[in-house]
Structure formats: structure tokens, C-alpha cells
Amino acid sequence: MAIVRYNVHNNGRRHAGSVNTRQLPDGTALTCAHRKPRPSLVPSIMGDIDAALRMPMRPLGNTGLEVSVLGFGASPLGGAFGAINEAAGIDAVHHAFRRGINFFDTSPYYGLTKSETVLGRALRDLPRSEVVLSTKVGRYGVDPRDFDFSAARVTASVAESLERLQVPYIDIIQCHDIEFGNLDQIVQETLPALAALQSQGLVRHIGITGLPLEAFHYVLDRAPPGSVDVVLSYCHYCLNDTTLLGSLPYFRTKGVGVINASPLSMGLLTRGGPPDWHPAPPPLRSAAAAAADHAAARGWDISALGLGFSLRQPDVSSTLVGMFTREMVDENINTALRVLGSTEAAAEESQVLAEVADILAPVRNLTWPSGRPLPSQGQPGTQPADA
Ligand code: NAD
């Protein structure tokens, strides 16, 4: 029974010391009501806890939580990017945790509850208090009619998510893709309903997610201080789009933590290209493919370049990447450790990044419409993107 050093984070508090590999750092972890203790798996998952020393953590706004700089996006566990092998997906979650990722994000929408179910099966074997778990309410399908931000629906939704995730509480509950809802309803009805669940201890912190940054501003301008803890923005801080930068000072004044999702622009910045449902306009798709080809010709993987670029932004607490295999987890963690070991890209990487930026320049910050018109705008409503 070997002795290993550990350095773990628990709701913002850091503990360091040494433990026997057959003990958990936090003895409460396997005793929660919904968890089926599976002691035989514990040493295999916790045995490599020393590796957690290498994954940097950042505070998440004023929540008191510390999240790994690289977060695990679980939408692929629901099949958003193609069919997955459930056992491999569970193994990917365990492997990510073992290598120091503590932040896992899902939604009832991903795979129409499948992502939550698979993630829940994986979480059974992890110590609950060492995981920061976020899920969402309000979005339940691909059609604009599949959104429901009413108090009754989001209250029921949290109960359903707790059941599927097999946990007694959720760390961050987020209103999913707010631009498809009525933003005034979100301020006046949804956030208060989630606050009621917070006071019952079922959820710890509250967030909002979506594509148009203006929707965050609309809600944060009107919601009472402290009623939104976290903003999850996607596809706005990556190689082809950095518009999130314009909102970071505002988010800081509002005291909200910032999560950047989809640093690979939902698959645009990958060797294999995006899935069919990807809403990017054709010029953006072509430029991203050209950038990937150019990077490959220069001996670089566009995903490693793109993830490295996003992770270097210090004002983002965690960058969420969608993953579903152990190999993908390793690849992305290795990128994180490489780029966070130094503040500057190495000379050769900087050169390739500059060449890729030139290729992407004509489509820089080109996005796609998402959701209803904001109350102050007159643009037509649109179909939701898959993530
Ligand atoms: P992403 O940009 O992380 O891209 C995911 C795609 O990249 C998948 O196809 C995955 O297989 C692939 N990939 C991952 N690592 C790779 C690597 N090293 N090499 C090659 N390909 C790689 O997009 P995403 O999954 O949509 O976003 C990440 C997470 O953020 C989601 O899973 C979800 O949890 C969250 N998210 C939330 C919202 C929202 O709330 N509205 C929107 C988007 C994303």
C-alpha cells in the first residue's frame, strides 16, 4: 500500500498531504445517498492522484470553486459528434479526473439525456466533493419549441438531472442557450426558481449560456446582483473568433466567472472537420479547412494549436473541450501542460499561429445567427445549433 502525495481542491479550499493509496483524500466522497460504493474501483481511479499536481486550477469568479483550466465537455458523450462507445466514454471521464481535470459539463439536451446518464455512471466512481459538475436547464431538443424556461419545468428538470447524474447536488446549474428563450422570463422567473433550488441545497451556483454575447449583457444588466454566478460562452474565443474579449471587462465588473466552451469551434478546428449540423457559413468552413491543411503541412495539428491559443487566455477560468476517448483526453491535457508551462508560444509555434491567423483573417469573427431577436433588435429567429 504505497504512500502518495496529494494536492486537491474542495470548494476553493486546498488540501495537501499524503495518503495511503487505498484511502480517499476525502472520506465523505463515497457516502452520498445516490452513490453505489464500488470500492474495488477506487484505488485504480485515485491511485494516480499525484498527477493532479500538474493540471493548473483557476478560481471561478466569486463562487469559491477552483476549476481545472481544461474542462471536460460531455456533449460528445451524448453522441453530438457521432456514436460513442459508452465504456470508452466512461473511461475517458475517469482518465481525465485521474490526470487532474475536475470540471465536467453536460446538459439534459446532449443526446436527449444520454450524456447525463453516461456521465452519471462515470461519476459514481469519483469522489463527489472533488468534482465540479455543471449541467443545464431550459433546452430539451433541436426545435425552437423544445425550450422551456418556466419555473415549473426548470424545477422538474433539476430533479431529473440529479437522478440521471446520481448525485445529491449540482455545482453549477445553467440556463441553456438563453437566446432561444424570453430573456425577461429568464430574469423574472427562471433565475428566481433556480435560487429557490439553491436555498434547498440542490444546486450551488447559477449560470447562463449562449452564443450571442449581447444576450448575457441583457440578462446581467437586469438580474439582481449575485443572482448569476457564471457565464458560459462558446465559439467566441478560438483561433477564428475572439469577440469574447470585448465582454470580459464587463463580466469582471459583474463579478461573474467566465467559462469558454468550444475552443475547437465545435469541430471546425479539427483534422476531420465539423459535423454536418455545424451552423458555420461556407466561407468559414472553407477557411477553417484551409487552416487545418496548412497547419498539417507545417507539422502541426490544428486542434493542438487552437486549444493552446484558447488556454493562454488568463481571464477565462476554464476552457471546455468536448472529449470521449482516453486518447483525446491525453492529447488535450498534453497540450494544456505544454502551453501553460510557458506564457508565450515557442518561436516555431508562434510562426505557424501567425500563418494560420492570416488564412483565417477574411472570416475573422464571422459567426452565425442564433436564437430569437433580442428585445432591442429586429432580426429573425433561427434554428438552434446542436451544442
Ligand atoms: P469543441 O470545440 O470542444 O469541439 C469538439 C470536437 O472536437 C469533437 O468532435 C471532438 O471529437 C473534437 N476534439 C476534441 N479534442 C480533439 C483533439 N485533440 N483532436 C481532434 N479533435 C478533437 O466543441 P464542443 O464539444 O461543442 O464544446 C465543448 C463543450 O462545451 C461541450 O461538450 C459542452 O459541454 C460545452 N458547450 C456548451 C454550450 C452551451 O451551453 N450552449 C455550447 C457549446 C459547448
Image: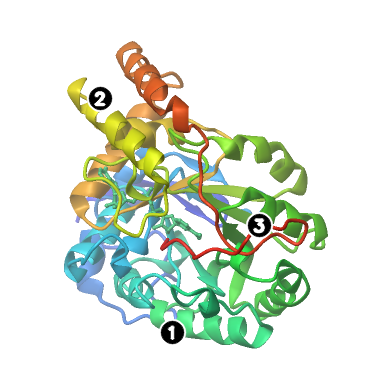
Of the residues shown, which amino acid type is indicated by label 1?
Glu
Which element type, helix, strand or loop, lies under badge 1?
helix
Earlier sequence position, callout 1 versus callout 3: 1
Quadrant for residue 180, please give it: bottom right
User: In the image, residue 353 lies at what x, y percent?
Assistant: 37, 21
The answer to whether the residue labelled 3 contacts the one labelled 2, judged by CB atoms less than 8 Å apart, is: no
Q: Amino acid at mark 2?
A: His
The answer to which of 58 and 288 lies nearer the viewer is 288
Residue 43 higher or lower than 28, as above or below: above
Residue found 43% across the figure and 33% down from its top = 239
Which one is nearer the viewer's eye here, 205 or 320? 320
Label 2: how many Cα within 10 Å (few below 14, some 14–19, many 20+): some
Q: Residue at x 38, y 50 (%)?
A: 266
Mark pair 3, 2: CA separation = 36 Å
Q: CA distance from mark 2 to mark 1?
A: 46 Å
Q: Which residue is mark 1?
A: 163
Instruction: Name the spot of residue 72 as percent of width and height, x first.
Output: 38, 54
> If you read the primary sequence from the N terminus, does the residue marked by circle 2 or circle 1 appear first?
1
Asked whether residue 118 is in view, the answer is yes
In the image, residue 231 sits, relative to residue 361, either above or below, namely below
| Quarter that holds the C terminus | bottom left
Please state if 34 lies on the left or on the right of 317 as rendered.
Answer: left
Which mark's residue is nearer the viewer, 1 or 3? 3
Which dot, 3 or 2, sits closer to the camera?
3
Element under label 3? loop
Q: Is residue 95 left or right of residue 62?
A: left
Q: CA distance from mark 1 to mark 3?
A: 39 Å
Q: Are marks 2 and 1 in contact (CB under 8 Å)?
A: no
